[in-house]
Amino acid sequence: MLNKLAKLKYLANNFEIIEDGDHVVCAISQKKIALENLTYWNVKEQEPYFSYIEASIKRDTNKK
């Protein structure tokens, strides 16, 4: 697969592929994240994050 958006269900320690694809898009920065590089996500919000920086931004936003 090349350049197809995947649909995932984010679980506590893993994710389930709902619809095949090769990447997802960061909920904060809108950067593409290859599935093999996906490390950060929010189970409650069902959102992926490009890095710990975007995950921290989301966490800090939710504290307000």
Image (tube, rainbow, N blue to C red):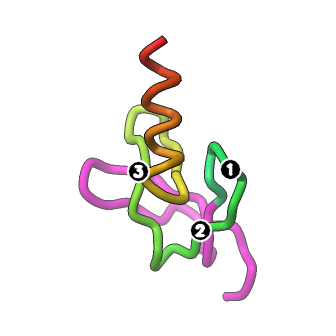
Give me the residue at 26% from left, 48% from top: 12
Counting from the top left corner in percent of width and height, residue 23 is at: 62, 71
* Secondary structure at numbered mark 3: strand
For the residue carrying disc 2, how many other residues have a C-alpha within 10 Å: few (<14), some (14-19), or many (20+)?
some
Amino acid bearing label 1? Ser
Between disc 3 and disc 2, whose residue precedes?
A: 3
Instruction: Judge depth for marks 3 and 1 and give the one in front.
Output: 1
Give the spatial CA distance, label 3 vs label 2: 14 Å
Amino acid bearing label 3? Tyr
Is 48 placed left or right of 28 in the picture?
left
In the rendered image, which residue does mark 3 sit on? Answer: 10
Give me the residue at 66% from left, 58% from top: 25
Instruction: Judge depth for marks 2 and 1 and give the one in front.
Output: 1
Which is more toward the observer, 4 or 62? 62
Quarter placement of the N terminus: bottom right
* Secondary structure at numbered mark 2: strand
In the rendered image, which residue does mark 2 sit on? Answer: 33
Which residue range is magenta in the image? Answer: 1-24
Which is more toward the observer, 60 or 1? 60
Is residue 20 one of those drawn in magenta? yes
Give the spatial CA distance, label 3 vs label 1: 18 Å
In the rendered image, which residue does mark 1 sit on? Answer: 29
* Outermost residue toward the bottom in this view: 1
